[in-house]
Amino acid sequence: MKPNFLLLFVFMSATLFASTKCDNTYSSASYALNHTKKSFSSKNFDHQKYYAYKALEALEKVKNQIEVCGCEKAMDPILDGIENLEKASDPKDFKMGRYYTKKAFGDIQNLISELDMYTQGIEQVINSSKVSIDENNSEEVALRSELAAIKSQKSKLAEEQVRLLERQKAIEEQINKTGS
């Protein structure tokens, strides 16, 4: 009984650890995506450059965090995004800034997709492992229940983050309107 419990604990820990390792990377990538959107939708040339620069900073942070996460396939979209955001943060004119921002937006979307596939792949490998679990064991049932609660809470936090980012955008737009 104890070997099954220990094996289950190791696999659950590995799942949570793998997911946690990429949470910061995913968060920074989302931040970069948000600022890239702001840059692209800016009507002011200075704002466009500013938000492109903020997105570039966030993507540089992702580049450093990707080593901890372990998703090597995400490095290409990161490097492409950095290259495009460098051009977007100091463009020749407004049109070129928008062009490179749009390209960077696509790169960051690809990055997030790679991160999604990577973290999903880790969970599938762990879930498909040949661990036999005795459903009648109350400890194991409790652990499964706790894992489901954690996944539910993670989902709720992600939804809350989206709402907060939307609220932040609305407040920033309101500030820009009153400041102009």
Image (cartoon, rainbow, N blue to C red):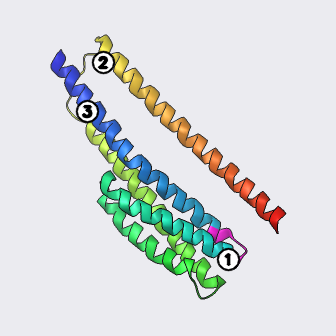
Task: Report the quarter where the C terminus lies.
Answer: bottom right
Residue indicated by mark 3:
11
Residue indicated by mark 1:
46
What is the span of residues highlighted in magenta in the rendered image?
A: 39-45
Q: Amino acid at mark 2?
A: Glu
Which residue: 35% across, 46% down?
21
The verdict on residue 41 being magenta is yes
Number of residues whose C-alpha sits closer than 10 Å to that of mark 1, classed few (under 14), some (14–19) or many (20 or more):
some
Which residue: 67% across, 72% down?
47
Q: Amino acid at mark 3?
A: Phe
Q: Secondary structure at mark 3?
A: helix
Q: Earlier in the sequence, mark 1 or mark 3?
A: 3
Q: Nearer the viewer, residue 111 or 177?
A: 177
Residue 20: percent from left, percent from top: 38, 42
Visible residue check, residue 124: yes
Visible residue check, residue 132: no
Residue indicated by mark 2:
140
Q: Secondary structure at mark 1?
A: helix
Q: CA distance from mark 2 to mark 3?
A: 12 Å
Q: Nearer the viewer, residue 174 or 108?
A: 174
